[in-house]
Amino acid sequence: MRELESIRLPEKPDATAPDGTLVRLLPTLAGGSLAHFELPAGAVSHAVTHKSVEEIWFFLGGRGQIWRRFGAQESLIDVEPGVSLTIPLGTAFQFRATGEAPLTFLAITMPPWPGAEEAERVEGHWAATV
């Protein structure tokens, strides 16, 4: 039987994601994991794609843009608090914080994040700064 888990958002990051964002780990279940991400104001992430997971993001703070490419589909959208989006398996993506505040979001990863080897860097839309 699995334990009931409750976590308060950690004050300090637990790790740096392969794309360069600061990560605060939140609860995990067999089907997925939840984490809080932060990209500093003015920063640009590394472009990556995932090998075995897909994600749903929900933006909490800051302003920015995200570029996604999935097969022949490519999009560039503005993000701000209240926006949510998907990162289907095999999607190349990159994002940047365009405002004066850090870009923060929650991400559900399905299945749970297996480790740093999950992400592969790819050619992105912008030059990374992190």
Image: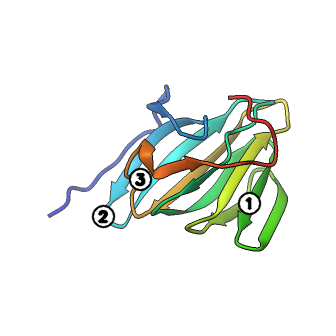
Q: Residue at x 55, y 49 (%)?
A: 120
Q: Quadrant of the C terminus?
A: top right
Q: Nearer the viewer, residue 74 or 25?
A: 74
Looking at the picture, how far across and down is residue 56, in whole percent? 58, 63
Q: Which residue is mark 1?
A: 68
Which amino acid type is marked by label 2? Answer: Ala
| Outermost residue, top side | 12
| Outermost residue, left side | 1
Gap in Å between the C-alphas at discs 2 and 1?
A: 27 Å
Q: Residue at x 69, y 39 (%)?
A: 45
Q: Which residue is mark 2?
A: 30
Looking at the picture, how far across and down is residue 68, in whole percent? 74, 60
- Binning the other alpha carbons within 10 Å of mark 1 as few (below 14), some (14 to 19) or many (20 upward) gives many
> What mark, if any, has residue 104 been given in the picture?
none
- Which structural element holds mark 1? strand
Gap in Å between the C-alphas at discs 3 and 1?
A: 20 Å
- Which structural element holds mark 3? loop
Q: Are marks 2 and 3 in contact (CB under 8 Å)?
A: no
Gap in Å between the C-alphas at discs 2 and 3?
A: 11 Å
Tell me which numbered mark, 2 or 3, is placed earlier along the sequence.
2
Which amino acid type is marked by label 1? Answer: Arg
Q: Residue at x 81, y 45 (%)?
A: 64
> What mark, if any, has residue 113 been given in the picture?
3
Which amino acid type is marked by label 3? Answer: Trp
Tell me which numbered mark, 3 or 1, is placed earlier along the sequence.
1
